[in-house]
Amino acid sequence: MLLTERWPVGLSPSRVPFARRTVTVLKREGYWGHMPRLDAVSESEVLGWWYSGQRTLNDLTATGDAAIAWHLTEGCELVEIAEERWTSQVWRRDPRFCDLLPAADVTVAEVCRRGSHVDQRELWANLPAIRATMGELEVEAPGETLRRYVGGLTGQSNDRLTAIMRVNGLEVPPMTGAEAASRLGVSTQRVSQLARRMREWIEWATPPDGVWMPQTEAAERLGQIANR
């Protein structure tokens, strides 16, 4: 048997970090979309494939075995974790978690279910830190989590962040464009530009199921902007 375990039907080879040559060989020989057929292939047959050799064989067996082991253990646990609601609300575009997530521009749930094993391993290693960050955010002062999120997206801080958030209805009391312009010492046109850019950043960064936000009111305010 070429591999120590049978190739799982649900494991796509695109999720496995095979070397480029191995990918080329598997596609040329017609196995890429039918990986379970490898169960009937011997090592001598692989060595006889065009463009194949000992290096390809070693990569196919070692990387394949490691991928199957991951898929059947930690990979299965990640699929269960994907059922937690927060996983569909957190992704790389979230400034609070971007340093802890794989580079893939998909939600944590999508990485758990269909991500490459490289991305899944990175996520698995950082899960404790992600959960710790969530715990810290949950006990922050009211409104601070929202400020951290919007400030991280826009690069704004202090008075400018406060004023533009109030213009957009993200903080209370609300503020008109003229009031914000007077407070910041800029034109009302500039305030309108900054407010629009903030809304655009929020819309861009909001996943389909909404942003993870421990405060219900803050989540609702973000949702109102994202769904305009």
Image (spheres, rainbow, N blue to C red):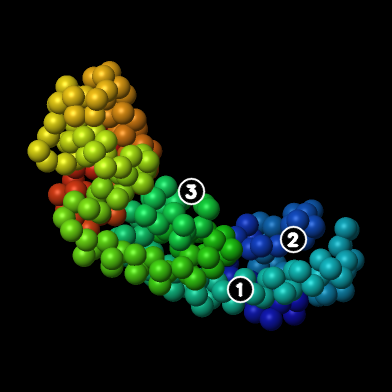
Decide: is 198 above or below 75: above
Q: Are marks 1 and 3 in contact (CB under 8 Å)?
A: no
Q: Amino acid at mark 3?
A: Asp
Of discs 1 and 2, which sits in the foreground? 2
Q: Is residue 176 visible to the viewer in this orientation of the structure?
A: yes
Residue linked to disc 2 = 19
Residue that label 3 marks: 105
- Residue 144's label in the rendered image is none
Distance (Cα) linking label 1 and label 2: 16 Å
**Residue displayed at 27% across by 36% down:** 160
CA neighbours of label 3 inside 10 A, class few (<14), some (14 to 19), many (20+): few
Q: Nearer the viewer, residue 214 or 68?
A: 214
In the displayed structure, 160 sits above or below 105; it is: above
x, y percent for residue 56: 81, 66
Give the residue type that dot 2 points to: Ala
Kindly identify which numbered label has been placed on residue 68: 1
First reached walking from the N terminus: tag 1 or tag 2: 2
For marks 2 and 3, give the CA distance.
Answer: 23 Å
Three-letter amino acid code at disc 1? Answer: Ile
- The local secondary structure at tag 1 comes to helix
Mark 2 crowdedness (10 Å alpha carbons): few <14, some 14-19, many ≥20: few
